[in-house]
Every structure is written in structure tokens, then in C-alpha cells.
Amino acid sequence: MIGSFTPYFDSEGNLILLAQGQIFMQNATGKGFMYYTYFNSIRTQLGETIVFFPLGFSENKPDDSTNIEIDIQVQSFNPRMKENDK
């Protein structure tokens, strides 16, 4: 699984996080691969936590399985800011 995240401001000044997921899986025969990709635009604010489930979310999963969860925050970058100024 590969995740790419691109924050940008739209024409109205809203912060948007473009999330792209790419999944590569070996097929059942073991002689080939399957490829899935998707995009999702998420409206957010600086510092807000976004919970991202790259393989989807399952509430009805077996006890021996789990969801993959990534927490993302978009922070402002200012190269002149020093560590003590935060």
C-alpha cells in the first residue's frame, strides 16, 4: 500500500487534503498482481487530525484481524520559525 497526501488551498481559501491510495496485491494464483487506486479530497483545517483508513474500515471483522489506521495533521510550515517559538 502506498499513500500520497497533498495539501492545498482551493479558490475559496479552504484547506483541502488530497489523499491518494495505491494498493498492489498478488492474486490468488500467485502468478500476477492486482492494482487498485483511489483519490479522496478532504476539507480540513490546520492542525485538525484526520483519521485515514487506507484499506477501508470494517466494523464486522474477525477477532484476529485489524484495521490499518493513519492519523494525519496538516501543519503550517515556516522556515524562519525556531523550535522555541512553537
Image (cartoon, helix red, strand yellow):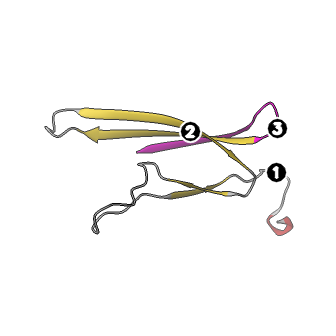
Could you tell me which quadrant the N terminus lies in? top left
Task: Give amino acid for label 2.
Answer: Asn
| Crowd rating for badge 1 (residues with CA inside 10 Å; few <14, some 14–19, many 20+) | few
Residue 58, magenta (yes or no):
no
Task: Give amino acid for label 3.
Answer: Gly
- Which of discs 1 and 2 lies nearer the camera? The answer is 2
Task: Give amino acid for label 1.
Answer: Asn
Q: Position of residue 56 (x, y in %)?
A: 43, 49
Residue projecting furthest to the front: 60
Q: Is residue 12 left or right of residue 27?
A: right
| Closer to us: 78 or 44 | 44
* Residue that carries the numbered disc 2 in the rendered image: 40
Q: Is residue 56 left or right of residue 11?
A: left
* Residue that carries the numbered disc 3 in the rendered image: 13
Q: Are marks 2 and 3 in contact (CB under 8 Å)?
A: no
Q: Position of residue 31 (x, y in %)?
A: 16, 33
